[in-house]
Image: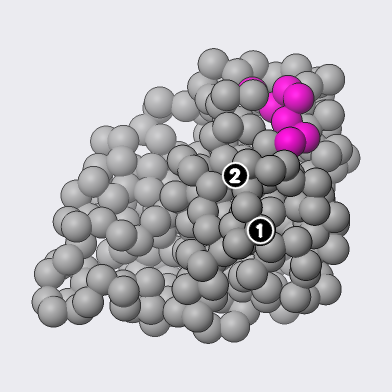
Amino acid sequence: MVRAYVGVSGWRYPRWRGDFYPEGLVQRRELEYVAEQMTSVELNGSFYSLQRPTTYRRIAEQVPREFPVAVKGGRFVTHMKRLRDADQGLANFFASGVLTLGDRLGPFLWQLPADLAFDEEVVGGFLHRLPRDHAAVAELAARHDDKLSADRTVTEPVVDRPVRHALEPRHPSFGDPAAVRLLRDHGVALVASDSPGRWPCFDEDTADFRYVRLHGHTELYASGYAPRSLDRWAGRLRSWHAAGQDAYVYFDNDARGRAPYDAVSLLGRLARR
């Protein structure tokens, strides 16, 4: 079944309390509330540091089955190693508990630094190493090093299903036909990243699904999306749906609390078709 999954990038923002989140809602129920209003969510904290299995377990308990939780890949791999010699970093990342999400595990998002230009050998080597199902995630996770203690690792799959990956480059060189062809060969989605002119917004079809990150309509991370803009995105989602593609869309304009309202508004537009 083809679906449009719409949500927010992260959900624990003090600015949202008493605004999007009802007055008196306890913090531990914020994700549960998001899951009632939206159809997916993007975990952002995994980019900054390795999360714990207990964190992923709590997330799985707070969202319904088949509610995709997209997981942002660690910056150790993307920004520090810059995709080079990343085997151990990938093993530790996948061992940190992502398998605990089971059928709630959505795509992995790999965001690249803005100064990382396309290099076919480097990017191709990285894409080749990405696991394509839960069993492959477990196999890679089992190679974690002793930086992770036994109580901080999960190396056994709980479901048997494929895994998706999306790449968010921020350098214009990724618009090169060779880069697009490489992602297409590996079935990795090239993220459409809307960022008020800050980074390029690619619109190439490279996988059996689409991945969109909306960072702000006119002001990065801050401004909301105008009704006409949301209408346009709804139209694009409908066209992808008609082409047989799932779509994952996450609003990252959270600085002034607009992200959750925009996500709900976009879902409302899709429901009216």
Are discs 1 and 2 less than 8 Å apart at CB? no
Looking at the image, how many numbered discs can be counted on the residues?
2
Label 2 element class:
loop
Q: Quick one: quadrant of the N terminus? A: bottom right
Please give the residue where the numbered disc 2 appears in the rendered image. 73
Viewer-closest of 196 and 104? 104
In the drawing, does residue 160 fall left or right of residue 62? Answer: right
Residue occupying image coordinates x 12% and y 77% = 23
Q: Position of residue 108 (x, y in %)?
A: 64, 52
Q: Residues within 10 Å of mark 1 (few under 14, many from 20)?
A: few
Amino acid bearing label 1: Ala
In the drawing, does residue 90 fall left or right of residue 42? Answer: right
Whichever of labels 1 and 2 marks the residue nearer the N terminus, that label is 2
Residue occupying image coordinates x 74% and y 36% = 88
Viewer-closest of 173 and 120? 120
Amino acid bearing label 2: Gly
Do we see residue 172 in this rendering?
A: no
Q: Is most of the magenta stretch helix, strand or loop? A: loop
Residue 201 vertical placement versus 52 (above, below): above
Viewer-closest of 200 and 155? 155
Residue 178 found in image quarter: top right
How was this image coloured? one colour
Residue 85 found in image quarter: top right
Please give the residue where the numbered disc 1 appears in the rendered image. 150
Q: Position of residue 11 (x, y in %)?
A: 35, 61
Q: Position of residue 154 (x, y in %)?
A: 69, 63
Numbered range of the magenta stretch: 82-88
Do we see residue 143 in this rendering?
A: yes
Viewer-closest of 189 and 92? 92
Q: Is residue 131 magenta?
A: no
